[in-house]
Image: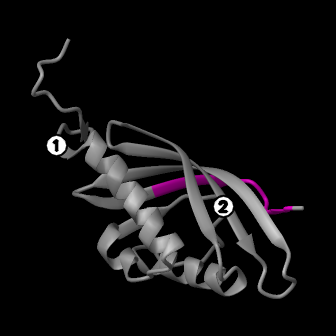
Amino acid sequence: MPPKHWTPVLQSLDNRVMMNIEDAKAFVKKHFEDFVNKQDLSAADRNFAPDYLEHGADVPPGLPNGPEGPKVYLAAAFKKYPDIHVTIEDIVAEGDKVVVRNTWRATDSVTGQKIEFAGIVIWRIVNGQLAERWAYLQAPHPVH
């Protein structure tokens, strides 16, 4: 059993201590809240590493690496779905990664159709920033 003062931490493969696990989960939760739910595109400049890499199956090809790619992607989503909201259903952290199961809900700005989809996102955190993302999202489907 670990000592009472022991706190689990995220570590990189070369054993650099990155962030304590609870802080890493809180960081990812705040990232979703600020960047998506509050539609604060400036959160990308704070939260994404300058050399951030995107591996998500949901992201269109040709987006730039670094914070600019997610800003372009989300800005387009905000236009199509101005009330988009993400809810974190589960969050788990180990090593230098945080995994989130989430549900997205929104209304299409053109048709007025309410949609929903779920996803799994894996974030790799380095030096207190999001360095890589792998995401697998359902296709949006109508909510009745």
* Total numbered badges shown on the rendered structure: 2
Q: Position of residue 47 (x, y in %)?
A: 33, 68
Mark drawn on residue 16: 1
Query: How is the structure coloured here?
Result: one colour
**Taken as a whole, is the magenta stretch helix, strand or loop?**
strand
Amino acid under label 1?
Arg
Tell me, yes or no, whether the two marked residues, 1 and 2, touch with CB atoms within 8 Å.
Answer: no
Residue denoted by label 2:
104
Looking at the rendering, which quadrant does residue 4 occupy? top left
Mark drawn on residue 111: none
Looking at the rendering, which quadrant does residue 46 occupy? bottom left
Disc 1 element: loop
Within 10 Å of disc 1 (Cα), the crowding (few <14, some 14-19, many 20+) is few
Asked whether, in this view, residue 13 is left or right of residue 114, the answer is left
From the image, which quarter does the C terminus lie in? bottom right
Q: Nearer the viewer, residue 72 or 29?
A: 29
Q: Position of residue 108 (x, y in %)?
A: 78, 79
Disc 2 element: strand
Q: Nearer the viewer, mark 1 or mark 2?
A: 2
Within 10 Å of disc 2 (Cα), the crowding (few <14, some 14-19, many 20+) is some
- Name which residue lies at 44% across and 82% down: 41
Asked whether, in this view, residue 51 is left or right of residue 78, the answer is left
Q: Position of residue 134 (x, y in %)?
A: 54, 53
Q: Position of residue 8 (x, y in %)?
A: 23, 32
- Name which residue lies at 22% across and 57% down: 127
Tell me the CA gap for discs 1 and 2.
34 Å
Which residues fall within the magenta stretch? 133-143
- Name which residue lies at 79% across and 66% down: 115
